[in-house]
Image (tube, rainbow, N blue to C red):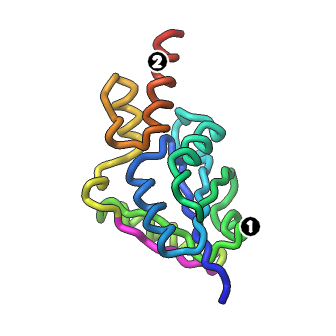
Amino acid sequence: MSEKIALYPGSFDPFHNGHLEIVERASKLFDEVVVAAVRNPQKSEPLFSMEERQLMIASSLSHLNNVRIVSVSTLVVNVARDVGATAIVRGLRAVSDFENELQMAQMNNRLSGIETVFVPTSSAHSFLASRLLREVARYGGDVTEMVPPPVAEALKIKFFETEMD
């Protein structure tokens, strides 16, 4: 029987507890989960560099032995092929996520034949969005309960350094 590898792509800017939950759950369903920090040209200037995101994600997922992290700036289906993924994992927070995610899943399937597995997040994390967390942290709000500890520390450093400049 061949190994089941899942690709979990996202911009992860920053990685939050909703992302963490999806990876933890996917790690129980697949032999290996490859978390791919993706450069998304449709999104605004990132808060964290790809290298910073990779380090935060790796630190946040160090308790999982079947997860690896990559960063990419190409089509997700190309990454899936390169890592030997048998599925793409996508998290769903609310019904409103489904339409866009379904369209991407259908395009990815059409391009590559790879299937997408949707994993609904728990209600405890359904409101989390990286965009909102960046905004709250930027204005001094406390997001420590919504992100893994390495991300909370990176956010403090990022905005403290910004204030010092």
Q: Residue at x 46, y 18 (%)?
A: 160
Q: Which mark is residue 129?
A: none
Q: Nearer the viewer, residue 2 or 101?
A: 2
> Which of the two labelled residues, at mark 2 and mark 1, occupies the earlier sequence position?
1
Q: Is residue 2 above or below residue 139?
A: below
Q: Residue at x 56, y 58 (%)?
A: 9
Element on which disc 2 rests:
helix
Q: Is residue 40 left or right of residue 151?
A: right
Contact (CB < 8 A) between labels 2 and 1?
no
Q: Is residue 89 left or right of residue 140?
A: right
Q: Residue at x 49, y 75 (%)?
A: 29
Element on which disc 1 rests:
helix
Q: Residue furthest toward the left? A: 123
Q: Is residue 3 above or below residue 51?
A: below
Where is mark 1, residue-wise?
A: 82
Q: Residue at x 34, y 43 (%)?
A: 146
Q: Is residue 18 left or right of residue 85?
A: left
Q: Residues within 10 Å of mark 2 (few under 14, many from 20)?
A: few
SS assignment for the magenta stretch, majority: strand
Q: Which residues are magenta?
A: 113-120
Percent from the top left, x then y, of residue 159?
46, 22
- Quadrant location of the C terminus? top right
Queried whether the magenta region covers residue 147, the answer comes back as no
Where is mark 2, residue-wise?
A: 160
Which amino acid does the dot numbered 2 rest on? Phe
Number of callouts in the render? Answer: 2
